[in-house]
Amino acid sequence: MDTKQSLSALAALAQESRLAVFRLLVQTGPEGLAASKIGERLDIAPSSLSFHLKELAHAGLVVSRQAGRFVIYSADTRAMNGLIDFLTENCCGGVSCK
């Protein structure tokens, strides 16, 4: 992940509802959740949720797929790990700090 992609991802996560959505999708795993279920669990109105999911998708943090009449969203763990790698690149002067 490069600087521009990292800034986009961090900006998307720098909002309470979007961070909550992303964390829920990370917890849910690759099977994901329908937008209606995300809204129910987090008590976010459908119009607001649609906006937040669009922002997360634009930042490359969530992916969607059609499942019948539902759109299922899941966290893009590759992008999440790329962001973590970007943030921790050269951490601790190259000495493992884990």
Image (spheres, rainbow, N blue to C red):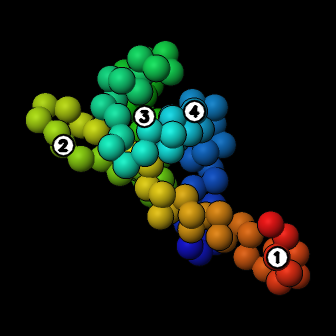
N-terminal of the two: label 2 or label 4?
A: 4
Helix, strand or loop at label 4? It is helix
In front of the other: label 3 or label 4? Answer: 4
N-terminal of the two: label 3 or label 2?
A: 3
* Residue 27 visible in rendering: yes
Residue 3 got which mark? none
In front of the other: label 4 or label 1? Answer: 1
Residue closest to the eye, 96 or 71:
96
Could you say where residue 50 lies in the image, as x and y percent from the top left? 38, 32
Distance between mark 1 and mark 3 Cα atoms: 39 Å
Query: Which residue is rendered at x = 50% and y = 62% of the image?
Result: 79
> Marks 3 and 1: in contact by CB < 8 Å?
no
N-terminal of the two: label 2 or label 1?
A: 2
Query: Which residue is rendered at x = 73% and y = 76% of the image?
Result: 89
Residue 51 got which mark? 3
Q: Amino acid at mark 1?
A: Ser
Distance between mark 3 and mark 4 Cα atoms: 14 Å
Query: Which residue is rendered at x = 24% and y = 47% of the image?
Result: 65
N-terminal of the two: label 1 or label 3?
A: 3
Distance between mark 2 and mark 1 Cα atoms: 41 Å
* Left or right side of 94 for 43: left
Residue identifier under label 2: 66
Helix, strand or loop at label 2? It is strand
